[in-house]
Image (spheres, grey):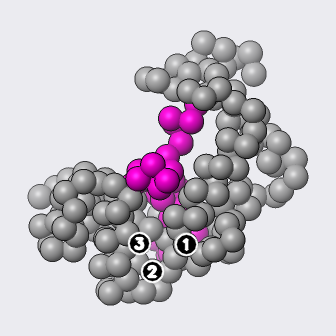
Amino acid sequence: LKGMLGFKHRTFNEVDLLFLIDVFKKHYSKYDSLETAFMAKSNLQQDRLEHFYNYLFSFEHLRRTQKHISTPAKNSACKRINMFLRWMVRKDDKGVDFGIWDSINPSLLSVPLDVHSGNVARKLGMISRTQNDWKAVLELDESLRNFDSEDPVKYDFALFGMGVFE
């Protein structure tokens, strides 16, 4: 890991990277998949994300590292983690989503909300919140489930693409 010393990307530095590598090493010494780190007592996406956050930071760490992992408990939209879960859980025939995890049902995923998908969702009347936060994610999830309750996040790329290319 000496090659990681001096690593820096914006505010993410070697301390943060080495912490995550150490956590993943400890996790994979006990489990075959990171999927288990997302298994909460309930099927709510919010609980799953909060469980992951709490699991990561149950290991010894510097407080500064916590800012790099989002959680709905802080009203974050959790875009990157929701995108990761989409890739790992959804099975598709287009090769976009890996679909290698089986314990989480795609119907329970939340949309990876960002500025582009949020703006389009507002223009389409799918959400009323002006902030791209966890409450907006829940509002958009509810709207998307009206279209397809079994796979609501399949609309993510369409919303994102419309926002980027409009």
Name the residue at the front extreme: 73
Looking at numbered disc 1 in the image, what kind of residue is underneath it?
Leu
Label 1 CA crowd tier, 10 Å (few <14, some 14–19, many 20+): few
Quadrant containing the C terminus is bottom left
Which of the marked residues, 2 or 1, is nearer the chain's N terminus? Answer: 1
At label 2, the amino acid type is: Asp
Instruction: Look at 21% across and 74% down and name the residue there.
Output: 126
| Front label number (1 vs 3) | 1
Report which quarter residue 131 is drawn in. bottom left
Q: Which of the image's four quarters has the N terminus? A: top right
- Reading the image, the residue beneath label 3 is 153
* Label 2 – label 1 distance at C-alpha: 15 Å
Residue lying at 30% horizontally and 79% vertically, measured from the top left: 143
Q: Can you say whether 76 is above or below 149 in the image?
A: above
Q: Is residue 130 visible?
A: yes
Q: Magenta stretch?
A: 65-94
Q: Amino acid at mark 3?
A: Val
Occupied quadrant, residue 103: bottom right
Asked whether the beta carbons under mark 3 and mark 2 sit within 8 Å of each other, the answer is yes
Q: Is residue 97 visible?
A: no
